[in-house]
Image (cartoon, coloured by chain):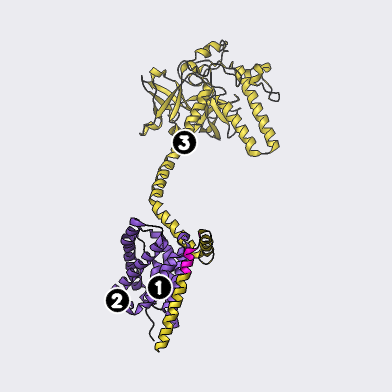
Chain colours: A yellow, B purple
């Protein structure tokens, strides 16, 4: 028994000594040999443990950074909440700058301050007054089109009647001049005055849904060419002598915060081509990009060229410079340069009275398409007159 | 030890090893608990000294492989601790939590002393600070965690009835 114990003890000591010597040998290994041994162990049977340790380290790092990440996430959330508003505002301001560069002169930028009352749905306060050059019956426009008209002017601010007002009227027409009428708020609608209607359109003139309606320039308040809306459908009214069309307005007054007030001296020049150039050419180009088809490309390009040709011919017929040719200095917003360059007004022919009762009747100084001489109309199948051709 | 007891001891041993490579780095304390020492001590009191020495040697190499600069130091320390724990099991093997806590504390502190001396990485005041401050703290944490785990894993670690 005692011998067995001694034998066991000796065996234990021998094993201990062996392990100790091996450990000392491992400790004494040079670095060049130590690293491969350790690497070999890590890559083989210790790999699961190494993986566990790595995951635990990552978990610890995640825990330590959780607060910082959360605060960063909160900051990003706040920023993203504001980003939408900023994008909308940026887009609105870009449009305003774009329309301003096309109008070139004779306008006053202003902020539209919407009230919250029931009557405030049809009126708005503008942040520019008579000191800035605003006068009564100055048109108020947005990048999308018509907004309203100034009805009261103070030195530092003014009050405008929106198109949703029951008393608002504007003489309107189709861009090609084939249909004329009076646009006003569609008050009989169940959905309030969010739509417009075009009344008094002659029976011989039909408008298709989607047709754009612009201001005709009659009446002396509104210059010609400001988008009013697009035709939705014809509606039946008790007036049997004329057609009435429902319009989707170009501008929702509730969304108009940055507007432009046109000066009186700018009205005579009209706004032909300010909107059409941008929208129609953009639409044509967009169709080219979207279609990707050569035939569609050719058709869209031809359509764009034809529209440009019509616009050029109409601009020349109205006495305005052709598309792309600047009439005045872009930085001149007073209208002096325009007066210097503008041709002398032609004697206006006697016309039927304006359907808009906005004060003193003003004759149209532009020529309707159906009264233009044949030799002044440029055929759309010919090469359009380019701005470069004037050099 | 019968087969059932051996299996349960192996399972407990593996749980401690896994905890060493998961919970310890997750907590990242300055004075960390050492689950490998706990696993070695709990295994050593159940096997003969030679087996405990081999177990300590293997565990030491495993821990050293993740710190190649000290390869061998952990093996030396754990070999001695394992052998000593198994040799002295008659003294410490008692169903007393306080005694077991002291057993864990002493095992961890001795291991640290052997390890840092064998590693030869820290010297002078820093070595004294490590051995007299951080190592006892780590040993105390290890002892506390060891007692807690011993309490929680009592069904696994108790010898099965004959």
Answer with left or right where residue A142 lies relative to residue A291.
left
User: Which residue is outermost to the left?
Assistant: B98
Q: Quadrant of residue B139?
A: bottom left
Q: Main secondary structure of the magenta part?
A: helix
Q: Which residues are magenta?
A: A22-30
Q: Which residue is mark 2?
A: B96
Q: x%, y% of residue A312?
A: 62, 21
Q: Is residue A375 above or below residue A188?
A: above
Q: Chain of mark 1?
A: B
Which numbered marker is on residue A88?
3
| Residue closer to the observer: A191 or A203 | A191
Image quarter in which the N terminus of chain A is found: bottom left
Above or below, B161 relative to A106: below
Give the percent coordinates (x, y) of residue A235. Answer: 53, 35
Residue pictured at 40% horizontal, 32% vertical: A121
> Mark 1 and mark 3, same subunit?
no
Which secondary structure, mark 3?
helix
- Neighbour class for label 3 at 10 Å: few (<14), some, many (≥20)? few
Question: Mark 1 sits on what residue?
Answer: B82
How far apart in space, not on screen, are marks 1 and 3 (Cα)? 73 Å
Q: Chain of mark 3?
A: A
């Amino acid at each position: 028994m005692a011998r067995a114990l001694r034998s066991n003890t000796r065996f234990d000591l021998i094993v201990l000594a062996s392990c100790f010597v091996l450990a000392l040998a491992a400790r004494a290994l040079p670095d060049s040999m130590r690293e491969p041994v350790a690497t070999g162990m890590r890559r083989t049977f210790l790999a699961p443990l190494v993986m566990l340790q790595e995951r635990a380290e990552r978990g610890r790092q995640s825990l330590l950074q959780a607060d910082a990440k959360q605060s960063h996430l909160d900051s990003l959330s706040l920023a993203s909440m504001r980003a939408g508003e900023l994008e909308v505002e940026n887009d609105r301001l870009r449009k305003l700058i774009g329309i301003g560069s096309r109008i070139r002169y004779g306008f006053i930028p202003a902020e539209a301050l919407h009230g919250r009352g029931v009557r405030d749905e049809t009126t708005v306060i503008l942040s520019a007054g008579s000191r800035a050059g605003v006068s009564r019956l100055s048109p108020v426009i947005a990048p999308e089109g018509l907004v309203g008209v100034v009805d009261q002017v103070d030195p530092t601010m003014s009050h405008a009647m929106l198109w949703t007002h029951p008393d608002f009227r504007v003489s309107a027409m189709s861009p090609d001049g084939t249909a004329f009428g009076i646009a006003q708020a569609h008050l009989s609608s169940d959905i309030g005055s969010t739509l417009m209607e075009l009344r008094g359109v002659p029976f011989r003139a039909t408008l298709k849904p989607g047709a754009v309606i612009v201001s005709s320039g009659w009446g002396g308040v509104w210059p010609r060419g400001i988008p009013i809306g697009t035709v939705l459908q014809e509606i039946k009214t008790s007036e049997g002598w004329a057609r009435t069309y429902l319009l989707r307005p170009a501008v929702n007054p509730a969304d108009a915060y940055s507007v432009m007030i046109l000066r009186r001296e700018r009205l005579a020049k009209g706004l032909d081509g300010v909107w059409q150039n941008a929208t129609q050419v953009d639409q044509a180009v967009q169709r080219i990009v979207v279609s990707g088809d050569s035939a569609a490309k050719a058709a869209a390009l031809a359509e764009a060229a034809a529209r440009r040709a019509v616009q050029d011919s109409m601009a020349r017929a109205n006495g305005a410079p052709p598309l792309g040719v600047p009439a005045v200095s872009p930085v001149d917003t007073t209208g002096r340069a325009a007066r210097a360059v503008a041709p002398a007004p032609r004697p206006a022919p006697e016309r039927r009275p304006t359907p808009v009762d906005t004060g003193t009747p003003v004759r149209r100084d532009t020529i309707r398409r159906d009264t233009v001489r044949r030799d002044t109309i440029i055929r759309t199948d010919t090469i359009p007159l380019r701005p470069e051709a004037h050099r | 030890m019968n087969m059932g007891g051996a299996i349960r001891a192996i399972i407990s041993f593996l749980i401690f090893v896994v905890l060493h490579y998961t919970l310890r780095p997750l907590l990242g304390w300055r004075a960390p608990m050492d689950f490998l020492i706990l696993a070695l001590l709990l295994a050593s009191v159940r096997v003969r000294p030679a087996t405990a020495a081999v177990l300590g040697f293997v565990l030491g190499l495993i821990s050293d492989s993740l710190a190649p600069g000290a390869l061998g130091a952990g093996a030396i320390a754990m070999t001695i601790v394992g052998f000593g724990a198994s040799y002295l099991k008659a003294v410490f093997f008692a169903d007393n939590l306080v005694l077991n806590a002291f057993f864990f504390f002493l095992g961890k502190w001795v291991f640290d002393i052997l390890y840092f001396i064998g590693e030869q990485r820290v010297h002078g005041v820093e070595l004294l600070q490590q051995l007299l401050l951080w190592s006892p703290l780590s040993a105390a944490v290890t002892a506390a965690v060891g007692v807690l785990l011993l309490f929680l894993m009592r069904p696994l670690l108790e010898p099965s009835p004959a």
